[in-house]
Amino acid sequence: QVQLVESGGGLVQAGGSLRISCAASGRTFSRHAMGWFRQAPGQEPDVVAAISWSGGSTLYADSVKGRFTISRDNAKNTVYLQMNSLKPEDTAVYYCAADRVALRSKVVVTTPAYDYWGQGTQVTVSS
């Protein structure tokens, strides 16, 4: 059983920064790509960023490029999302998720590729 636990969400003013974390257990974390997704009320989850199992490849949604950075520490079984220059439209519940395929050769961003999801952490950006 894989468990993903997000933390670090909260309320921040526009232009501010926040770092959210996702601690993993129950599977060999270092063998699986990880993704961050977000879901605003009434909308489907959208990918924010993803990182390969090695950390050598990353992908970002166009809306967050240059502002958000995904990283991972395989020794700590943790993936991070550093969010800078936050905007009100970044407000959402942020979920981390684990790629179902180990050692995948490329980063994927489609939700069906991810089989384990955390419970989510709320990020609210005030204007």
Image (cartoon, rainbow, N blue to C red):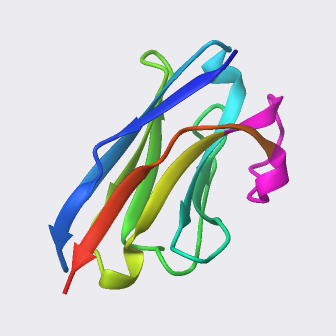
Check if residue 100 falls in the magenta segment: yes
Residue 47 is situated, as x and y percent measured from the top left of the image, at 63, 63
Q: Is residue 85 left or right of residue 60?
A: left
- Magenta residues? 98-113
Residue 50 is situated, as x and y percent measured from the top left of the image, at 61, 52
Q: Is residue 103 above or below residue 118?
A: above
Any part of residue 17 in sight: no
Q: Residue at (37%, 73%) from the top-left corner?
A: 91
Total marks in image: 0
Q: Residue at (51%, 22%) from the top-left corner?
A: 74
Question: In the picture, residue 126 is in which quadrant?
Answer: bottom left
Q: Is residue 113 left or right of residue 18?
A: right
Q: Residue at (41%, 73%) from the top-left corner?
A: 66
Q: Is residue 17 above or below residue 28?
A: below
Q: State the quadrant of the C terminus.
A: bottom left
Q: Considering depth in this image, is 31 or 21 the residue closer to the camera?
A: 21
Residue 4 is situated, as x and y percent measured from the top left of the image, at 54, 29
